[in-house]
Amino acid sequence: MSKLRSLIVWSVVFTQVWSPVLAQTLPISVDKSVAGAKPSVGVSNGVPVINIAPPSAGGVSNNRYTQFNVGPSGAVLNNSGGASQTQLAGQVGGNPMLGNQRASTILNQVTAPNPSQLLGTMEVAGNRANVIVANPAGITCNGCGFLNADRATLTTGKPQVGPDGSIGFDIASGKIRVEGAGLNGANLSQVDLLARTLEINADVWADKLNVTAGAARVDYATGAVSAQAGEGAAPEVALDTAALGGMYANSVRLIGTEAGVGVNIGGNLVALTGDLQVTAAGDVRIAPRGTAQAAGNLRVDSGGDLSVQGAAQAGGTAALAATRDVSVQGAAGAGGALTLDAGGDVAVGAQGSLRTQGALRMAAGKDLSLSGGLLTSDQDLRAQAGRNLKVAGQAVAPQPGQGGNTGGGTGGGAGTDNGSG
């Protein structure tokens, strides 16, 4: 090949891949103040391509930006030392900073107070890797997704990266908002949403969904969460899912860390094949149009009050517990045992219903009232109160000799115990 032809070919490749980022109006700006290797950003076929920084010995590529956004055309994270084929940008050249190295985790962290907008798909070129976007200023996802990634994490925590590849997140502020076209992570093994507050106005899809809402320290490898003080005034609600928003995954774990800061489920929170666990230091409210549903087991623990105005349903067992009061104005049901446990009062309203194919257990540290609702158990039914127990509704359980252990009390064969004597 002549020198002129070689120069022309090189110029075409250079222009295609490493021209300035003009493919999207939303900027990706590298933090040039950081010492050491930095990512570089170019374009291939109209799609931003990021040559990631070389990974540490622990496999973490730590990339710092003053602005990190993804437009509708998406963005490619180049994790290959040689040329590779991508779905978003076609063939892209090798990342010259990698050589034979490959990252197992690609961390994209924003170091300036500029919120991130993720409006498209992030694709890993080359070797599959975990993808993290960390921005304490906040993240909005509207049609975001991931290709050739194993695990995706969106967080407003400040990353703490160890030389061995260990990663932790220090969450003190910031909001993750999911809106519009939502978040599609169903093709990943796990999706993490970690922020002081989360606002879910569209659907989130995942295989395994891990959500932490509130000021906390989170270990990336183990998922261990420890509460800590946040910056500024505490929000009223740590997690708010609107009527048009929903979270759908095969298994779901949701943790709210701040005392007095609630969780509001106004849409659908669904574990499609496995368990759903909700643990909150503040109140938990399942709104009239809200649903907490698990194909497996359901457990909701509130450090304040638990209010079920919508539906709480499980194919397996269901346990609804609160440090203060549990109230059911909607429907709670289980294929296995159903348990309501409150340090204060348990109240099932006139429009409330409890249905289970297993045993039904209700325990209140103070008063327990069943005000006209329907209670149905295929096994035994027991209600216990520390003070007063009032049954004004209809309770249906097997009579003695029908296979149920009823305890010989009132309410259609239901066993009732009044702890006040």
Image: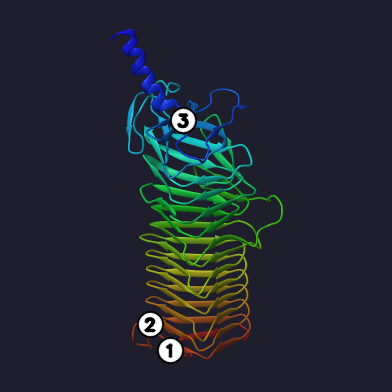
User: Horizontal and vertical percent for residue 163?
Assistant: 55, 29
User: Horizontal and vertical percent for residue 216?
Assistant: 61, 49
Indicate the secondary structure of the residue bearing disc 2: loop
Q: How many marks?
A: 3
Q: On screen, 38 above or below 260?
A: above
Amino acid, disc 3:
Gly
Q: From the viewer's perspective, is 314 left or right of 5?
A: right
Residue 75 showing in the rendered view: yes
Q: CA distance from mark 2 to mark 1?
A: 9 Å
The residue at 43%/84% (across/down) is: 406
Label placed on residue 59: 3
Label placed on residue 413: 1
Indicate the secondary structure of the residue bearing disc 3: loop
Q: Earlier in the sequence, mark 2 or mark 1?
A: 2
Q: On screen, 333 above or below 189?
A: below
Mark 2 in CB contact with mark 1 (< 8 angstroms):
yes
Q: CA distance from mark 3 to mark 2?
A: 57 Å
Quarter containing the C terminus: bottom right
> Circle 2 sits on which residue?
404
Q: On screen, 63 above or below 375?
A: above
Amino acid, disc 2:
Gly
Q: Residues within 10 Å of mark 3 (few under 14, many from 20)?
A: some
